[in-house]
Each structure stands twice: as C-alpha cells, then as structure tokens.
C-alpha cells in the first residue's frame, strides 16, 4: 500500500489506485470529464492534470497510478493554468444555452468553469454549429453543440451493455458522437448515458424540459421495485401546485448490487405514480356496481363480511395471495394477520413459476432479472407460503372455483391476467368476499367486493430483500394520494373491527418484531440496514 | 572522406527497376543469409545498437535500444510494424524507397523481425501510396517465391509472414500507437502511454514500430558492419540520411547524405540554390512540425543534436525552403490548417487548439487581425504543448511559435495594414 502526499495531505491507498481515486479518499476533488470509475481510462479530456514532483510534464490523474513517496499538487500555478486552458478550449465552441439546458445547475462544465475557468472568452471566432436535437433512441436526445467529446457514452455502450451503438465520427474539431449506421440507442441500459454525460448533450426524452435541477426539492434514497435485483436508486421529486411529482429516477452507486447503473425499465418504468388512471377511491360492491365510499366504511364492511365467512365456514375458508412487490414489513403483517390472527394456512405469494427458488435468473448477465417482483426472497424468508394443510395460489383458485374457499384477499396482484389460460374470473366470481388492493384498475379489481387503492413504492417506508438476500430500504419520496391508505393500516383496521390487535404498523416497529423472531432476519436492527443494505450473516445466493 | 550512397545506391544503376532480379544483381539479399545463418538475434540487436542507427521517422530514437525493450519470454507473439504512413508535409523519402527499391525494405524487415523474434510483420502503408503498395505487394510476392519470406526462410528454421496494410488517409496514423489502433481496425487515434508498444503494442503484444528508411539501413549494417555505419557522419547521428528538399530550390528532390551536411550545402549545392537569385527567408529543416530556421542558421549541420541546439529538430528530414517572396503568416495559416485538419480530436487542447490557431492565423492573413492576437497565439501554443496524449498538438504549436519568434514584425504588419503585404507577389 503506497503512501503519497496530495496537496500536503498524506494518503495510503492500494497499489494501482489512480491519483483521482486516491485524492477522493482524502476529500480532494480532481476535476475530470472523461474519467469514470466504471469505464475504461482514455485520458482524453486532459482536465485532471496534476503536478507530480520530479516529473517535468503535468500528469493526468486518471491514468497515473500512485507510487510510494509521490508528491502531488492539484493546484500548483502550472496546474491552474493548464486547467483554465482546457476549460477555455472547451468553451470555444460550447453554446451558451445554459438557461435552457437540462444540465444547467448540475453541470460539471458549468461548475468547473465557475471554479477554475476563465471569466471571459478570448475567442472572437464564430462558434461551430451542429445538430441541436437528434433523437438517438427511445429515451435519449443528442445535442451535438453541447457535446465535449468525453466519449463516456461511447465507452459505456461498448463496455457495459456491450452493444456499441455509438461511436466518434469524423476527426479533430469536426469529431461528432453519432450512431453507427442502422443502429438506435435502444439497449436496455441506454438511459445511463444521460447520467454519464458531463454536459447537457445527452438528455432524457422523459425528463427534458420538465424541471430545473433546483426545482427538484427532494432526492430520496430508494430501491427499484421492478425486479429482484433491487438496484439502488435516487428519486428526484419536484413540487408542483397540484402536489409532488416523481420526475426522475437515477442510479445510486452500490458496488454489490448495481455498481453505477440501472436499466431503462427501472429508470422510466416507475414514473407512473402520478398517472390519472390510478385507483383513487376505495370502493365496495354489494351488487353489480361498485360504490365509492370512505376507506373506513369499506374496511368495516370487509371486516363484517370476513367475520360472516369465518363464523359460518371457519378460518380455512379464507385465503390470501400477497404480491412479492410488498415490503418485508407488509408481508410480515400479512403472515401475522392471516396465519396467526385469523388462523388460515392458505397464504402464498408465488403467482408465477419464476418466483420459486432457483427459477429466478439474470436476464443478460448485467442487472435485469427474470423475477419482475422486488421481494420474492423476502416473502420466502418471512414465510408467505401455505402453512400445514394450506393451499398454494393454484390450490386457492381451485378451492374458490369449487366453492370451498369463501373469502380471498389479493394484495397487489392481477390474478386474471396472471393466469390467462384459466377461468380465474369465474372462480373469483364464486367468492363471498374478494378484497383486492391495487395501484391500477384491473380485471381482478373489477371482480372485487372491496377495492383498496394501494401505495406505490415511492410512497412508503419499508424494505425489500433482493435475490442475493440483501435487505435494502426504501423511503417515501412522495406524499401518498389522499384516498390511499397503507396496507398495514388497512389490515390493522380490519383486525380492530374484528376485535383483534395487529400491533404496531410503523415499519420500524414492525421490523423490530421481525428481528425478534426466529429466521434469517433475527437480531437485525432497523438502523443496521444502511444505505447500501445489509446481507444477514450466512445468507447469500438465491 | 567522400560519402558513398547507401540507401539509394542501387537506384543509380542504369535501368534499375527494383524487381527481384535487379536487386539480386546489385548485391541484394546477401545480408539476409548472413543474419539468419551466422548471427544470433541478440547479436543482431547488439550490432544495430553499436551502429548508432536512430529512427528516421521523426523522433530519432535509437533503433537498437527500441528493439532491446522487447521483453524476453513474453507468452504473446512479437510484432514488427513498418511505418510507411509517410505524411509529414515536406517529406517524400519513404515513398521513393518503397517505389524504387522495395526489396531493400523487405530484406530489412526480414532481418529485423529475426532480431526481435517476430513471425508476422506488417507494413502500414499510407493510403495515398496506391502505387507504392502495389510495388510492395509485387516485391513481397517475389520474396515469397524465392523463399525470402514464409516458412523456414533459406532453410534457417526462421519463418516470417509479411502483410501490407493500407491506411485510409490520416496523418495521425503515422503516430505509432495511432497506427497500431488503425492496423487493428479501430479508429486511428493515439493511445495513452505507458504502456509503450514494446510492452503492449499491436493486439496488446510486444511490438516494434520502425520507419521505412530506418529498416532499409539494417541490411547494410549487417553486410558492412556497425563500425562502418557508425563512421558515417557525426558520432551521435550516424549513418546516411535522406533529405527531402522542396520549396524554393532549383532542384527539389531526395538527397542521401551524411548528417554532417550543412543547411547551406543542402540548399545551395544539392538543391541547386534558390530560383531567380532571390534571397533565402526561412527553412523548415525536418518536416512541417519542425520550428523554422533562417539565414543565420545556414552553417549548422543537419544532425539531430545540432538542429535541436538551434531550436528546431531533425524530424522527418523534410527540408522546405522559402525565399523572400514568402509570407510567413500565410505559411502559418497553411501549416495550422493542416494540423486543424489532421488532429484526431481526442484531446481537448489539440482538437480545439489546432482549430483556434488556424482560424486566428487565417484572420490575420486576411486583414482581420487584432494586436492582442499575437500574444494570444503564443499563449494558445503554450497551452497546447506537452499536455496531450501524442505530440500532434506540440507539432502544431511549435512551428507557429517559431514563425512568431523570427517574423513577428511581419505579423504586426498584417495587423497594422489590415492586409497581407505579400498579396499578389507569390513566387512563380
């Protein structure tokens, strides 16, 4: 482990570390554009030049490994002049459209120019004009004038998804990033180039012109809910007159899970929480048409109907199919409510074959996994499976069809479309009580007696356990719609109406009860689960 | 001591066409059996080291030392790449060596490959050398037919395949790592160094890249010995050198001379002096990248050290002579336009700086200059030098600095008079 001095600060880092990373360890920023720790080093932007004692030329910090006794200056007069020059060269042809640029306000070119650059241009030459908006693919638009040719996007496509749609074309000052003929930037990870772009050259078709960076008042750490990988994300929210809006989902670095990346589904697929088509009102249907009513009224009617079923047919006439999209805390309460309080063994989460152990697999060797629910591992760990004599999902549907099962709770699953080959709707139609919680209306909610609008992943606190067994927290970025109530509260209220106490429903307190129980999560405190999650000792793999 | 031509000696034989029979009759392919059968590779490397041969492509790096950097016992193959991407403005000597006497180069490549343990060599030929590439291809075919290439050459047990690859028209592919990228089928842009090609070159394998002229010297060193070679010209710049003399001279052309020749001799005796009895104004001594020299430098000799001491460089041996009718701002504009056109564009200073230099010089030449432009040009040059992956940026900046150093009044005159004072006075 070589020890070196950077701006007078001593730092010891593993051999092979470059000067940028070594400086980062002691809080010194070496400005750079082309370097990214997740991509190959090309040393092209020349922004990270530093002064290394006993070497005549400035060294680029990205491509210079540390050495024992090295003395580095990141702010010598020589470095400052060289850095100012690089910025001046960049700005020769960079358009001054910062006021209408998505990057303005969070732009490294802007920031470093303010910090290290020349205040005024010495150039009187006409700027080079290029194409301002070229659609590169389903998610990305390119502004060639803003591009500083750092080639991060090119290298990303070559090295991460290995699709290589982008290249540098032409030469010298005429160089331009472009698509290879016949290509679209449509790989499953294309959105990452938007984050990688150090200027506003690559912008998001979904996000562009929606907000200025300073409108984004909250940046909430969370976990992507769209597959079992559990990529770490940051949720950017802006305030609007009519409420808050989740505008942008960005990857959050976690080397053990998603490195620096997320897939396009994760980036763009969860932005639908403000969708006007979302379920807005709890409904109760006694006859043919559902009636909108207060949450408490729907829950009271649900409790009454449930009591009738259990009194007439026993608890075994009740079943629950809970999605593995629910958080660990919600799933714990599901098990507690149905298995322990009601006493029915018919509880399951495995709607799809992919949710069984060992069925879930990587889709592409990168991040995306075949199990498109976030928490199958948590559901398994918490025992959301049939108890002794209990029915699985198929068994419950069969029992409903035969009239043996009288009441069924379907929590955030659309059973009708999950089993297109089975007469699910008919089976559901025979139930005395069908309770469905859901974000959106579906064929399953249409068959329900009680419909409870659910909360989206960005509206609740809790945790998911990813396929590796890593417990990761999500935090609420948005205030839930007025009519929505958390599943935990709904179950607690039904329990209350039945005269049973579900206990605390606050996720942290629920977790405390999970930690008291035997099982993989025993002994883990809520505060132990940090921003990069936690893998319980002895837990890994699928 | 009278200098006896080496590299171009055969070309002076009447009716010499450079085919296999001509080359053999002139005494060619005699070094090859000697090297393969009588010398160990290490001894060959030593011999070239002792000869003092330095690279003729531009940098003047000692050839034997370069060969010595090839790591011993690498699990990867070793490659020899002959750089014949001759593109430096004012330089046209490799082209002649290829077109007039290709077997000399082939023989040099086979011997050099043997010395460094290479079994697959490449000639990276400038895209515009269509004829040269054909000539080489024919010569290589003849060499295969005679057993000078291929498996078990001359029964020595040494095998070598030789492939000609034509570039696509980029100056930057003459930079050795840019050349290797291009040869690998990628965009021709230089690689950050280290690693150097000797360690990680073509296909990430140990690689030697040598210039055409450099390799052409090798058979002669083998035949006549290192001591003979070292005795030609100044001690540190040994051996013959081809100077491509162009511009305002009566007899432009390639002249093979020892590097002890002075600039005066080169221009007046060999180049036949300046047409019309006009006066010399400036000379570029080593290709367009070299800082300019003037009449005051006529008595320096054309070796690497003397030219460096005079603030210029030996470079590629392209000597461009300019007489008093030449506008140095116009020269600057033309040279800057070249680098603007040829910068690969990966490094910021070079991509943007070459363009800015060109636009500023064009503005001054066309009467739009401002007083502050001259210091601005010098500061641009300072910001471009020594800060990029390869030296194209330096090569663009250094000549402009030198034009301003020797001819600043001429630039000032353009700015004051808002016009080029040489307009309409171009030499015939």
Image: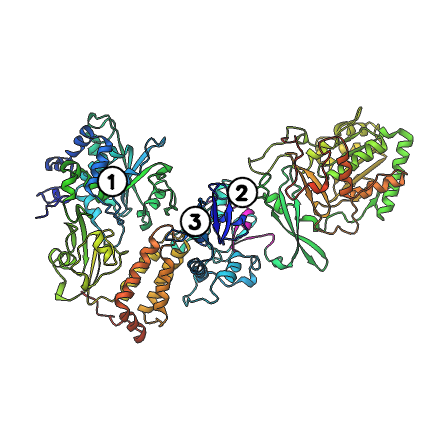
Quote the CA–CA distance across marks 1 and 3: 30 Å
What residue lies at 46% left-to-right and 48% top-to-bottom?
A62
Question: In this figure, which residue is indicated by the disc labeled 2?
Answer: A187
Subunit that carries the residue with mark 3: A
Residue that lies at the very extreme toward the top in this rendered image: A389
Q: Are labels 1 and 2 on one chain?
A: no
- Residue B201 spot, x, y in % from top left: 35, 39
In this view, A488 is above or below A103:
above
Q: Secondary structure at mark 2?
A: loop
- Which of discs 2 and 3 lies nearer the camera? The answer is 3
**In the visual, does A98 lie left or right of B329?**
right
Q: Are marks 2 and 3 on the same chain?
A: yes
State left or right for residue B294 relative to residue A390.
Answer: left
- Determine which residue is flagged by label 1: B64
Circle 1 or circle 3, nearest the eye: 1
Q: Are marks 1 and 3 on the same chain?
A: no
Q: Quadrant of the C terminus of chain B?
A: bottom left
| Lateral position of residue A358 relative to residue A74, left or right | right
Residue drawn at x 78%, y 29% as measured from the top left:
A396
Magenta span main SS: loop
Q: Which chain letter goes with mark 2?
A: A
Q: Looking at the picture, does residue B268 appear above or below residue B176?
A: below
Which is in the foreground here, disc 1 or disc 2?
Answer: 1
Q: Which mark is residue A43?
A: 3
Q: Is residue A200 inside the magenta stretch?
A: yes
Tell me the magenta residue range.
A182-207
Q: Is residue B386 magenta?
A: no
Q: Position of residue A210 (x, y in %)?
A: 62, 57
Q: In 3D space, how far apart are the residues under numbered discs 2 and 3 (Cα atoms)?
A: 26 Å
Q: x, y percentage for residue A147?
A: 48, 55
């Amino acid at each position: 482990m070589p020890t070196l001095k950077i701006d007078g600060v001593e730092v010891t880092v593993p051999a092979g570390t470059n000067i940028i990373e070594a400086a980062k360890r002691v809080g010194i920023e070496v400005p750079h554009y082309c370097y990214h720790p997740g991509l190959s080093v090309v040393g092209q932007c020349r922004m990270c030049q530093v002064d290394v004692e006993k070497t005549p030329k400035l060294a680029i910090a990205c491509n210079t490994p540390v050495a024992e006794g090295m003395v580095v200056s990141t702010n010598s007069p020589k470095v400052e002049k060289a850095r100012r020059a690089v910025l001046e060269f960049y700005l020769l042809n960079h358009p001054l459209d910062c006021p209408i640029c998505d990057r303005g306000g969070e732009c490294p070119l802007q920031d470093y120019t303010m910090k290290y650059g020349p205040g005024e241009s010495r150039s009187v030459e006409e700027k080079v004009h290029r194409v301002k908006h070229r659609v590169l693919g389903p998610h990305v638009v390119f502004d060639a004038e803003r591009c500083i040719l750092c080639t991060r996007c090119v290298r990303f496509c070559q090295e991460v998804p290995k699709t290589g749609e982008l290249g540098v074309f032409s030469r010298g000052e005429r160089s331009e990033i472009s698509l290879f003929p016949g290509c679209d930037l449509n790989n499953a990870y294309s959105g990452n180039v938007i984050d990688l772009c150090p200027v506003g050259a690559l912008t998001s078709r979904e996000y562009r012109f929606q907000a200025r960076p300073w409108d984004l008042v909250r940046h909430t750490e969370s976990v992507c809910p769209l597959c079992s990988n559990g990529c770490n994300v940051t949720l950017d929210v802006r305030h609007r007159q009519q409420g808050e809006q989740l505008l942008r989902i960005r990857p959050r670095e976690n080397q053990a899970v998603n490195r620096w990346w997320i897939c396009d589904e994760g980036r763009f697929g969860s932005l639908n929480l403000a969708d006007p088509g979302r379920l807005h009102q709890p409904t109760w249907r006694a006859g043919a048409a559902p009636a909108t009513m207060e949450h408490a009224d729907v829950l009271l009617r649900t409790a009454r109907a449930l009591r009738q079923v259990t009194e007439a047919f026993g608890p075994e006439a009740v079943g629950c199919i809970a999605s593995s999209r629910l958080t660990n805390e919600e799933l714990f309460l599901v098990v507690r409510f149905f298995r322990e309080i009601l006493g029915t063994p018919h509880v399951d989460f495995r709607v799809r074959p992919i949710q069984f152990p060992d069925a879930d697999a990587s889709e592409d060797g990168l991040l995306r996994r075949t199990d498109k629910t976030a928490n199958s591992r948590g559901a398994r760990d918490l025992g959301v499976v049939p108890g002794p004599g209990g029915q699985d999902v198929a068994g419950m549907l069969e029992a409903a069809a035969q009239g043996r099962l009288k009441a069924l709770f379907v929590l955030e699953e659309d059973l009708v479309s999950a089993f297109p080959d089975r007469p699910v709707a008919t089976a559901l139609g025979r139930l005395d009580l069908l309770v469905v919680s859901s974000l959106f209306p579906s064929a399953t909610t249409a068959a329900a007696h009680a419909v409870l609008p659910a909360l989206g992943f960005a509206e609740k606190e809790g945790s998911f356990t990813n396929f590796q067994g890593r417990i990761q927290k999500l935090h609420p970025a948005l205030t839930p719609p007025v009519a929505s109530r958390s599943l935990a509260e709904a179950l607690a209220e039904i329990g209350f109406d039945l005269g049973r106490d579900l206990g605390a429903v606050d996720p942290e307190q629920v977790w405390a009860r999970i930690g008291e129980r035997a099982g993989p999560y025993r002994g883990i405190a809520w505060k132990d689960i940090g921003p990069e999650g936690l893998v319980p000792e002895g837990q890994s793999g699928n | 001591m009278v200098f006896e031509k080496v590299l171009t000696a055969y070309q002076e034989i009447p009716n010499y066409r450079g085919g296999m029979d001509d080359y053999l009759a002139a005494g060619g392919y005699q070094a090859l059996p000697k090297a393969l059968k009588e010398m160990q590779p290490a001894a060959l490397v030593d011999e070239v080291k002792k000869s003092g041969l330095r690279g003729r492509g531009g940098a003047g790096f000692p050839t034997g030392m370069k060969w010595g950097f090839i790591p011993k016992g690498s699990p990867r193959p070793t490659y020899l790449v002959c750089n014949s991407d001759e593109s430096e403005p004012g330089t046209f000597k490799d082209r002649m060596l290829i077109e007039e006497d290709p077997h000399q180069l082939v023989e040099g490549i086979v011997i050099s490959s043997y010395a460094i343990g290479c079994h697959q060599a490449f000639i990276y030929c400038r895209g515009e050398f269509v004829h040269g590439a054909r000539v080489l291809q024919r010569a290589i075919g003849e060499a295969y037919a005679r057993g000078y290439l291929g498996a078990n050459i001359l029964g020595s047990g040494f095998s070598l395949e030789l492939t000609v690859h034509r570039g696509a028209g980029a100056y930057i592919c003459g930079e050795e790592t840019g050349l290797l990228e291009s040869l690998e089928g990628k965009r021709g842009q230089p690689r950050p160094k280290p690693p150097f090609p000797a360690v990680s070159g073509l296909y990430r394998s140990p690689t030697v890249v040598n210039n055409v002229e450099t390799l052409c010297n090798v058979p002669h060193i083998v035949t006549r010995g290192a001591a003979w070679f070292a005795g030609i010209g100044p001690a540190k710049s040994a051996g013959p050198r081809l100077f491509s003399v162009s511009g305002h001279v009566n007899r432009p052309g390639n002249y093979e001379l020892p590097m002890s020749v002075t600039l005066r001799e080169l221009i007046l005796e060999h180049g036949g002096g300046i047409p019309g009895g006009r006066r010399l104004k400036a000379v570029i001594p080593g290709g367009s990248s070299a800082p300019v020299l003037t009449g005051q430098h006529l008595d320096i000799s054309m070796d690497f050290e003397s030219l460096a001491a005079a603030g210029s460089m030996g470079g590629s041996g392209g000597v461009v002579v300019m007489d008093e009718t030449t506008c140095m701002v116009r020269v600057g504009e033309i040279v800057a336009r070249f680098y603007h056109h040829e910068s690969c564009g990966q490094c910021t200073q070079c991509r943007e700086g070459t363009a800015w230099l060109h636009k500023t010089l064009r503005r001054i030449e066309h009467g739009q200059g401002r007083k502050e432009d001259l210091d601005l040009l010098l500061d641009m040059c300072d910001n471009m030098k020594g800060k990029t992956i390869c030296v194209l940026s330096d090569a663009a900046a250094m000549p402009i600095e030198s034009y301003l150093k020797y001819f600043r009044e001429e630039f000032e005159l353009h700015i004051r008079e808002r016009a080029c004072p040489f307009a309409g006075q171009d030499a015939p």
